[in-house]
Image (cartoon, grey):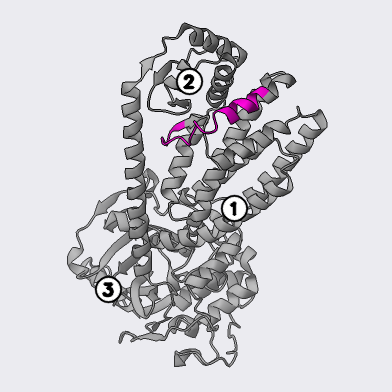
Amino acid sequence: MADFMIRFFICNIFISGMIGILLIAKGIFKNILSSRMQYHLWFLLLGLLAVPFIPFSLIGFPQIFSWLHSLKISPASGAETVLGKSMGILPTETTNWMNDFTLSIHRETPPIAGYILLGIWIAGMLAMILLVIKSSLRLHTLKKSALPLQNQAVRRLYLHCLEEAEIPRDIPVYSTAFLKSPIIVGLLKPCIYVPIHLISDYNEADMRYMLLHELQHYKHHDAMANYLMNLAGVIYWFHPLVWYVLKEMRNDREVACDTSVLKMLEEEDYEDYGNTLIHFAEKVSLTPFPFAAGLGGNMKQMKRRIINIASYEKPTVIKRLKGLCSYFLIACLLLLFMPILSVNAAVKTENTYPINKNDGNISYLDLSSYFNGYQGCFVLLDAATGSWQIYNKALAQKRISPNSTYKIYSALLGLENRYITSSSNEISWNGQDYPIPEWNANHNLTTAFQNSVNWYFQSLDQTAGLEALEDFYTSIDYGNHDLSGGVSSFWAESSLKISPIEQAKLLQRLYLNEFNFDADHIQTVKNALLLSSTDKGSLYGKTGTGNINGENISGWFTGYVETTENTYFFALYIGAPKNAAGSKASEIALSILSDLNIWY
């Protein structure tokens, strides 16, 4: 949630630009767009304000957010943005064991900032909700004090107005002493409230125009619009431009209702309608209730409405067509922001991998004693029986950044695309000084795995390009397939996620070559993954470490044990604020495998 707040904060920068574009577009096309179209443009904006809260990403998410992501997380590529120090993890004493090296990924905004923003945001929303509740209670008091309309002349006029507006529903009308101007309130059970002084000073023309105005609010579902505007005000209480937009939306709503009334009137009645507004300009006021739509408004709004009435002409067919074209042009421009505002697009699919009936028999283990001080999980797939043994089901299903374990498949892609071959896979060091001494040399596939050399696998990825990478990780069904974090860092505490269960299943598919890749390439990757061999079998695997701001916060060890009788595929993950690394994950995994009599 704290991470969401950081991205939500970034989104509000785009929201400000989006509002600016909309205001400019409205200014350019104000003489072409009808008042109703100008009002409806604000609904597009309200819809876009909801996009950051959609719990899934949108199709066609642009790479601009990948650039934003790189501002938060620097790729471990040795570029200027990579400022973290080397986190050298000591290799175990096992023969041919892999060094679990990683670079610290530097986050410009520390996590605490997200929690601070979250606390401020929630506190502001609670304050806004209290204000809405207070206004709602005042409205409730008004409803209790109001009386059903008794004046027969006004009642007959009201029934006539219903016919004029072509509204078959008889909306209840009440009189009240607590209002200066009429309002209509209610979503499911709308009611009109008319001030007593307007009934006492009854003027048929004035009353007709006011009733028609309120009925237009009902006809165009402005009650729902009120709820949406108030919801936006609560969520975006901190954003001054959003508050300005909501004020303008209310103004445009009243102008649109005026125009709807004018369409019903004869041309000679336009002046009378305008005079009604002028006559009551001192009496009417902005409604104090959050869910009400009324005739009133401030003097600036009244002036705008009078000008609109004075200049009103019934639109021609050509003007309507121009208005529609302009409306759709602005709408398309606004909709371009939709993917950018989808702050949850860092995860293109669900964060949880579901266990289903096709996953075979599952038994759950209690391995908590092995994970002292760590949040962790362990999964083991028995190839002979297809059965699973799982510790911490919830975490085993959760998709997590793979970190260096992804290099298994980066190597496979490099071989399949012939960037390297089984017999010739050395890549020359570019001379850049890396903080890990072992990286400052030429490397082949085996040594690149042993020393977890980032630049080696990044070179393969960059040669392939983002499009080929996306196709490859989708074809092998690697986790969420999301590479929006960029070619250099999508795997390092970034966009690509995979669950421990998927890690084990994917290793089995690689072992059996269900990908239908070149058998020699599969064997080359297997050879590079070999960690240790005994007369009882062989252990294959790859570690991975996630390091944020100098702290090891996650560790992977995934691989398989091949014996003469069976093959076991496993994945172990640990997480903690610090001291969680691939080396520790491998230590825990080996203890578990030993106690399960799988590896000694």
Of the residues under marks 3 and 2, which one precedes in the sequence? 2
Kindly identify the residue that appears in the image at 42 percent across and 66 percent down: 401
Give, as a three-letter code, the residue at label 1: Ile
Is label 3 or label 2 in front?
2
Q: Position of residue 565 (x, y in %)?
A: 33, 64
Give, as a three-letter code, the residue at label 2: Leu
Tell me how far mark 2 sits from mark 1, CA to CA.
39 Å
Magenta segment: 272-292
Seen in the image, is 599 located left or right of residue 113?
A: left
**Residue at disc 1, secondary structure:** helix
Q: Position of residue 586 (x, y in %)?
A: 31, 75
Q: Number of marks in the image?
A: 3
Of the residues under marks 1 and 3, which one precedes in the sequence? 1
* Residue under label 3: 590
Q: Is the residue marked by circle 2 packed among few (<14), some (14-19), or many (20+) residues within 10 Å?
A: some
Q: Position of residue 286 (x, y in %)?
A: 48, 37
* Residue under label 1: 19
* Camera-side residue of 143 and 583: 143
Kindly identify the residue that appears in the image at 52 percent across and 12 percent down: 158
Give, as a three-letter code, the residue at label 3: Leu
Quarter of the image with the N terminus in it: bottom left
Tell me how far mark 3 sits from mark 2, CA to CA.
85 Å
* Residue under label 2: 198
